Each structure stands twice: as C-alpha cells, then as structure tokens.
Amino acid sequence: MPSNSRAAIQRAISLSRLARLPTDVTESLVADAVLLEVPAGGVPIRQGHEPTAGLIVSGLVRAFHTAADGRQITIRYARVGELLAVMSLYVERGGALGVEALTGSRILMLRPATARAIAERDARVANLFAEEISIRLLRVVDELAGNTFGSMRQRVVRHLLDLAAGPTGQRSPLVARVTQQDLADAVGSVREVVVRLLRDLREEGLVQTRRDEIELLDPDRLHAETFPVGEY
C-alpha cells in the first residue's frame, strides 16, 4: 500500500472512535482490510448487503434507504473518521441502508470475520462497536422523528446544515454543494417543493443559491428553526 494511503488511513483512525484502542488492536482490525477508491456517485455498499463495516478515509458519503417505489431518503452523511455499517456485522443481510459517495471517496472496508473475532476476545472492541451501533440507532430515531413531526422546511434546512458542515463541524463560508434534485431526494420530496422552499429562504436572507450549491448566510437562525435532535 502506498505510503500516502497508509498516512491517510492513520489520520482517519486518529479521527475515529478507533483512536481509543491500543495501536496493536487497531492494527489487527485493519490488517486484512481493503481500501476502496469510490468515484463521486459510486455506490460501494448497496441496500440489503451482507455483513460489512468500513472506515471513511477521505470524501463525503451518504447512507440512504430506497423504498419499493424508488423514492429515497438520506439517513446520514459521513465524513473522514466515521464508521459505516457496523450494525450489519451482527445481522445477516442486515444492511438496511445503501451508501453513495457524494465526492470521490476512499473507504477502508474491514473484513467482517476479523472484526467479529477481535470483538469476541477483546471487550474494548466489543464496547466500541456497541457504542457505535447505539449512536446510529439513536440518530435513526432522531431522523424518524424529524421526518414524522418536522415540516418539510425543517427537513431541508437540517440537510443543508449537515451537508455544509466540514469534518470538524466548522467551515466558513458554509456552503452545501448539492443540486436541487439531490436535495429533494434526500428529504423524500420533489424538486418543485424544494425550489419553493429555497426561494423562501433566499427571500428571508438565510441562503444564497448558485448552480449546484447553496450558501448558508445565517446558520444560527437556520439551526434555531430545525427540529431539535440529540447530540451524541
């Protein structure tokens, strides 16, 4: 593996929950892992997938669910240092979400058998996986609550804030690089509704729209009106 890839993997580990583990343990976890290069728009993990787990080394991806009629809803966005699909390690064909790269991304795919074997003999790894699964479950519940009780405007604003946030949650200016159609898909709506909501936000001085990107001019006001979610 090229030295620049090794350095990128080490940086991703340092930003992840895996950083809490001793170095020899993380080295065992990734010893037989495979680094995937995923172009923008690529779908490295498909809905209904077999057990798997990954660590984002670079790029921005989204985890989404597709309904039988083809509609999609985005459940989360994930960046460098975040783990993917850990829940599916323990449930056969438990992959309820697909994963799409929104930018060119690299994902370190762990070998499921290795990850489970290490977790079985090391309580620290088992606890870390349990924490990751618990947090993902709680955030899915938050998303469900937001989609059920929040207005479409609140859902659009939440996705804009999430997309615009950088790896540390801070970026200036805050810009969500997304098409209106992709934003509509993410919130489970249609483009016409999203266009109207963006026009309202623009007229209120909250956003500025350009081709395939939306700048958040007043993120504090936008955040204040979103459906409240937990912080984990």
Image: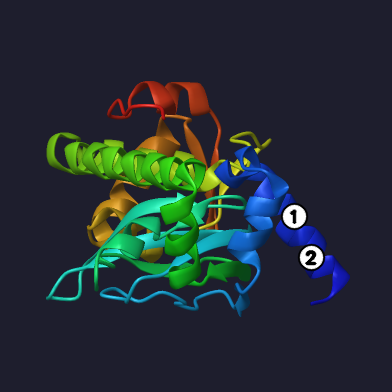
Instruction: Tell whether 151 sits left or right of 213.
Output: left
Disc 1 target residue:
10
> Relative to 120, does residue 185 appear above or below in the rendering?
below
At label 1, the amino acid type is Gln
Question: Looking at the picture, how far across and down is residue 181, in whole percent?
Answer: 36, 65
Mark 1 and mark 2 in contact? Answer it, CB < 8 Å.
yes
Question: Looking at the picture, how far across and down is residue 189, in whole percent?
Answer: 22, 58
| Spatial separation of the CA atoms under disc 1 and disc 2 | 6 Å
Question: Looking at the picture, how far across and down is residue 95, in whole percent?
Answer: 29, 68
Which element type, helix, strand or loop, lies under badge 1? Answer: helix
Asked whether residue 180 appears in the rendered view, the answer is no
Location of residue 87 (image quadrant):
bottom left
Name the residue nearer the viewer: 122 or 157.
122
> Relative to 101, does residue 194 appear above or below in the rendering?
above
Disc 2 target residue:
6
Location of residue 55 (image quadrant):
bottom right
Farthest front residue in view: 121
Instruction: Tell whether 167 sits left or right of 140.
Output: right
Residue at image location 30% in from the left, 25% down from the top: 228
At label 2, the amino acid type is Arg
Location of residue 188 (image quadrant):
bottom left
Which element type, helix, strand or loop, lies under badge 2? Answer: helix
Asked whether residue 41 appears in the rendered view, the answer is yes
